Amino acid sequence: MAARVIDAGFALVYLRLLGRTDVGSYQFLVVFTTYLDTLIDFGLNALVAREVSCGRVSAAAAFRAVNLLRLGIWLVGLVPVAVVYGPLRPATNLSAEAGLAGWVFYLALLPSVLAKTATGVLWAAERLELSAGVSVLSTVLRTALGAVVLFGGLGLVGLATASVATNVISAVVLWWLAASRAMASTAHPRVATSELPLAAEYEGPEPTGEHAGAARWLGESWPLFVNQLLQGLFFKVDALLLPGLAGNAAAGVYAAAYKVSEGAGIVSSSFTLALFPRLARATDFAGAYRLALRVLLQVAFPLAAGIALLAEPIMAVVGGRDYLPDSAIALAILICYLPLSYANGLTQYMLIAAGRQRLLTGAFVAALIFNLAANLVLIPRFGYVGAAWVTVASEIVLLVPFRLAAMTVAPG
């Protein structure tokens, strides 16, 4: 949470120094890099946390196998990077500088291969305070370096270079923490599947084991990857469509408002990640889920109402008067998604904890189809306003199948 607060503080700097147009390009680069980051993760972090915490595989074996897999995936990711920042760059309204920055941002993902796997091991050991501390450290470094390069006039390429330096340092620290603090404590002996919580509900292949090959890891993790990618596409694809369909200035206005609405999700994401290992071992699964959902919604509704009412002064502080009134209008609409997002996020990880991640895929496919179609229709006509309403509606589309899937695991 502290890292998100620091990152929000950095937004006060770059929104003013870059301006609407460059902020739109920056948002495109960040979102596209996030999709590539999802590719490299390939759903493996949640799988590492589940398998290690339940004793199906030792932390050391998972660390070795998953790092090798992610390195191979990073190499595969060079193909879409070359296409988007090469022949497709004019269609996205990206400048040559932005294209170069995109390549540097992808280079910054290479050390995250190690960092992500180390985080998964710490997650399994319920040592999220360690990875959270590193997240704060990396955010402080990225913010400090980013401010230096922006004030130095280095723009988007400077921000990408700061990301490379930060990720290298974070990867080294996380590797050391995982090796010294988590691997010994999570190197459980292999146990029978029937002895594990929710064993009767488990839908995947046999336990991963110490020497399971890449196919086993990929076979079990690909539904998680597909769901994460679909979720990212349906929720953030508007950031990729806005520059080409409505211009970089409109994309910048929307990005400023989106930064605030995204920050409001801190409570839900932090709470859900901390709860995940306990959900995987819960005996009263339905009770734990209902209690967590009640707590999150009690926070979400008043928070969303307050932000909507104060949208204009909030955006005046975050982006400055240059973004008004457009960003305030976008924020007042966007924040309506918050209670839906809190509920959907918890339900997603509840299903993963129960080994029912395949139930998520259909829901995300439906949401993505709706989101793409609606954005393609509404953005050319209504710009950022259309994109904001589509974001809210997409959460409603996702809520219905998520609720039906949740009833199969936690009825009541």
Image (cartoon, helix red, strand yellow):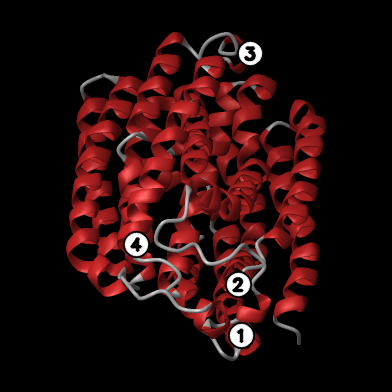
User: The residue tagged with tag 1: helix, strand or loop?
Assistant: helix
The residue to which callout 1 is attached is: 285
- When the figure is inspected, residue 108 is found, relative to residue 268, above or below; the finding is above
User: The residue tagged with tag 4: helix, strand or loop?
Assistant: helix
Q: Mark 1 belongs to which amino acid?
A: Phe
C-beta proximity under 8 Å, tags 2 and 1: yes
Between circles 4 and 3, the one closer to the viewer is 4
On the image, the x and y values in percent for residue 403 come to: 76, 70
The residue to which callout 4 is attached is: 121
Q: Image quadrant for the C terminus? A: bottom right
Between circles 2 and 4, the one closer to the viewer is 4
Q: Mark 4 belongs to which amino acid?
A: Val
Res 371 quadrant in image: top right
The residue to which callout 2 is attached is: 350
Foreground pick, 351 / 373: 351
Res 69 quadrant in image: top left
Is 334 placed left or right of 402 in the picture? left
The answer for how far apart the CA atoms under marks 2 and 1 are is 9 Å
Mark closest to the chain's N terminus, 3 or 1? 3
Between circles 4 and 1, the one closer to the viewer is 4
Mark closest to the chain's N terminus, 2 or 4? 4
Q: Mark 2 belongs to which amino acid?
A: Met
Mark closest to the chain's N terminus, 2 or 3? 3
The residue to which callout 3 is attached is: 91
Q: Image quadrant for the N terminus? A: bottom left
Q: Residues within 10 Å of mark 2 (few under 14, many from 20)?
A: many
Q: Residues within 10 Å of mark 1 (few under 14, many from 20)?
A: many
